[in-house]
Amino acid sequence: MPFEPSHLKLDPDGAERTSRALDGPELKALEDVIVDQPRDVAGVRLFAVDGLRPFLNPDGPIGAIAARAFEGGPRPVRAILFDKTPAANRSLPWHQDRVVAVRERMDVKGYRPWSCKHGALHVAPPFDVLRKMITLRIHIDPVPETNAPLLISSGSHRLGRVPEIDIPAAVARSGVATCLAEPGDIWAYATPILHASERATKPGHRRVLQVDYAVGELPSGLAWLGV
């Protein structure tokens, strides 16, 4: 059975919660920044959204968590807004995040295949790139067990790239943790950790701003898309 462990740490578990990382006024300000984004869609990629940068910079309430977790000055390289509602109440099977968003397509060894998601170019990089990334999930709404919390398989980020056929066995070995949250909480997890989400049994709003952070540049002229 999934459980909600308060003791999870980025090292070694691959996930950690910061409770009330955003206070009431900060959370309201973040809501105001994203208020005009599309609703009832699986995920909206955010580009050049006015007002978002102060939250994501290293001295901002979100960026500071990434800066504490990773040395080398991590920077935001992709942001997605999820809004699970009664009209968009989808489940997400167990998987690894395997792609990064870039500005333009270039033929670079080890970077393939290519795809386009919501107008943004994505490519699957070598696993070592993903291993050096961290993902933050900023919760705008409460996420009890009935509102489709994120499920993570503790420690699975240390398994490397897991073939899809082997994911169920990997989850069974590592176990499952349920990432409950309150408004203003931030869950940080290693980007390649195995994770999933079920349909909400009592769907309302479940708005989550997800931001990927990375350290360093991509090779051979490839450039992070950024936020």
Image: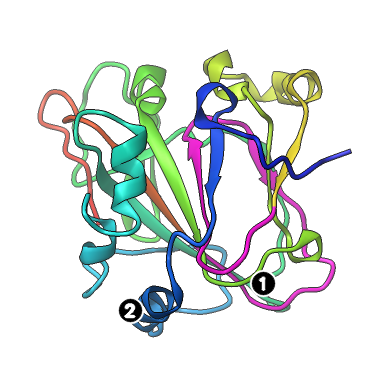
Q: Visible in this render: residue 162?
A: yes
For residue 67, side relative to residue 31 (left or right): left
Percent across and percent down for residue 106 are 18, 32
Q: Which residues are magenta?
A: 180-208
For residue 150, side relative to residue 117 (left or right): right
User: Residue 190: within the magenta?
Assistant: yes
Q: Which residue is mark 1?
A: 88
For residue 221, side relative to residue 73 (left or right): left
Using a 10 Å C-alpha cutoff, classify the residue at mark 1 as few (fewer than 14 neighbours), some (14 to 19) or many (20 or more): some
Using a 10 Å C-alpha cutoff, classify the residue at mark 2 as few (fewer than 14 neighbours), some (14 to 19) or many (20 or more): some
Picture layout, residue 67 above or below residue 216 = below
Percent across and percent down for residue 139 are 53, 63
Percent across and percent down for residue 57 are 21, 54
Quadrant in the picture for the C terminus: bottom left
Percent across and percent down for residue 159 are 58, 15
As shown in the figure, which amino acid type bears the numbered disc 1? Ala
For the residue labelled by badge 1, is the local secondary structure a helix, a strand or a loop?
Answer: loop
Q: Which residue is found at the position 73% from the left and 38% from the top?
A: 177
| Disc 2 from disc 1: Cα separation | 22 Å
Q: Which residue is mark 2?
A: 33
User: Residue 225: within the magenta?
Assistant: no
As shown in the figure, which amino acid type bears the numbered disc 2? Val
